[in-house]
Structure formats: structure tokens, C-alpha cells
Image (spheres, rainbow, N blue to C red):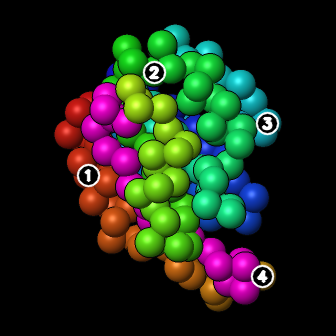
């Protein structure tokens, strides 16, 4: 049972979260949507993650979800967002993730995110704004389906 963690990011928060998830979920690989198009047939479990800007999920991930909805419905899947505005998370999920995927996903969660002034410029402030406890709970929940 191989897990794909596919993400899209502008500021790097989703990449950082995907890398942490890869360490916590056995037999997983991460792919940046901007660098590679994965063959979803090679995976039984899929985690889709994206950054949020202006209350919209990163467009290449939105497009990925729409285009691949039929195959995602045959997989164990979950989604995460990196959204620095917690009050908008429910609306972003509703507006960005197709309803069928929202109903099918075992979990959809926001780990927080980088405000423009928080984008890490050094290792010292890396992951500022990311809720690592939520990330760990998400990984633990997802791992129960492996």
C-alpha cells in the first residue's frame, strides 16, 4: 500500500508539511505538482495538500482534484491546507474541493500557514504558523487506513 503525498505551494508551507508527513507515514512519496504529474494507478492512498492565497487553494491542486476526481474516489484519500486565516478555512474547503471528494475524504484539515511576513527566511523561523500537533494527528489518523 503506497501513499502519494502531492502538494502545491507558493510560500513553501505545503512543501514543509508534505515532507513532515512523509516522515510520519510509512511507504510514502511526495511529489510537487509543479514538477511532476504522478501516475495515480501506482498508489492506493493519496494525500493532497495545498497552500491558500486570497482565500483560494493553489490553482494547480484545484485543477488536479477536478481532473482526477473519478480515480480519487477509488482511493483512500485525505486533504490538507496551509491557510493562515483560520476563519476562512471552511469556505476555502467548500469552494476549492469538489463535493464528492469532500464527502469521500477521510480527513480534510488546515495546518495553519505562513502569513506574508512569516515566510521563512532562515531555519530559525521555519514552520512558524504551522500547527505541528494537527499535522501529527492527521498523520496518525491517516495511518490507521494503511
Q: Position of residue 103 (x, y in %)?
A: 31, 32
Give the mark toward the camera: 2 or 4. Answer: 2
The residue to which callout 1 is attached is: 140
Q: Residue at horizontal 48%, vertical 14%?
A: 71
* Residue under pointer 2: 72
Magenta residue span: 102-119
- Circle 2 residues within 10 Å: few <14, some 14–19, many ≥20: many
Depth check, front residue: 65 or 23 = 65
> Which of disc 3 and disc 4 is earlier in sequence?
3
Q: Confirm whether the magenta stretch covers residue 37.
A: no
Q: Nearer the viewer, mark 1 or mark 2?
A: 2
Between disc 3 and disc 2, the foreground one is: 2
Q: Secondary structure at mark 2?
A: helix
Residue that numbered label 3 is attached to: 35
Q: Secondary structure at mark 4?
A: loop
* Separation (CA) of disc 1 from disc 2: 21 Å
Say which residue label 4 marks: 121
Amino acid at each position: 500500500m503506497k501513499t502519494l503525498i502531492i502538494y502545491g505551494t507558493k510560500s513553501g508551507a505545503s512543501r514543509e508539511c508534505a515532507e513532515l508527513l512523509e516522515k510520519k507515514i510509512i511507504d510514502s512519496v511526495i511529489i510537487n505538482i509543479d514538477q511532476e504529474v504522478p501516475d495515480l494507478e501506482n498508489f492506493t492512498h493519496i494525500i493532497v495538500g495545498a497552500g491558500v492565497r486570497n482565500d483560494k487553494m493553489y490553482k494547480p491542486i484545484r485543477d488536479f482534484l477536478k481532473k482526477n476526481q473519478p480515480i480519487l474516489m477509488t482511493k483512500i484519500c485525505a486533504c490538507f491546507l496551509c491557510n493562515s486565516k483560520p476563519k476562512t478555512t471552511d469556505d476555502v474547503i467548500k469552494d476549492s474541493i469538489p463535493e464528492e471528494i469532500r464527502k469521500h475524504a477521510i480527513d480534510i484539515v488546515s495546518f495553519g500557514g505562513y502569513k506574508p511576513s512569516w515566510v521563512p527566511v532562515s531555519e530559525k523561523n521555519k514552520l512558524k504558523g504551522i500547527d505541528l500537533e494537527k499535522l501529527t494527528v492527521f498523520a496518525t489518523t491517516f495511518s490507521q487506513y494503511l
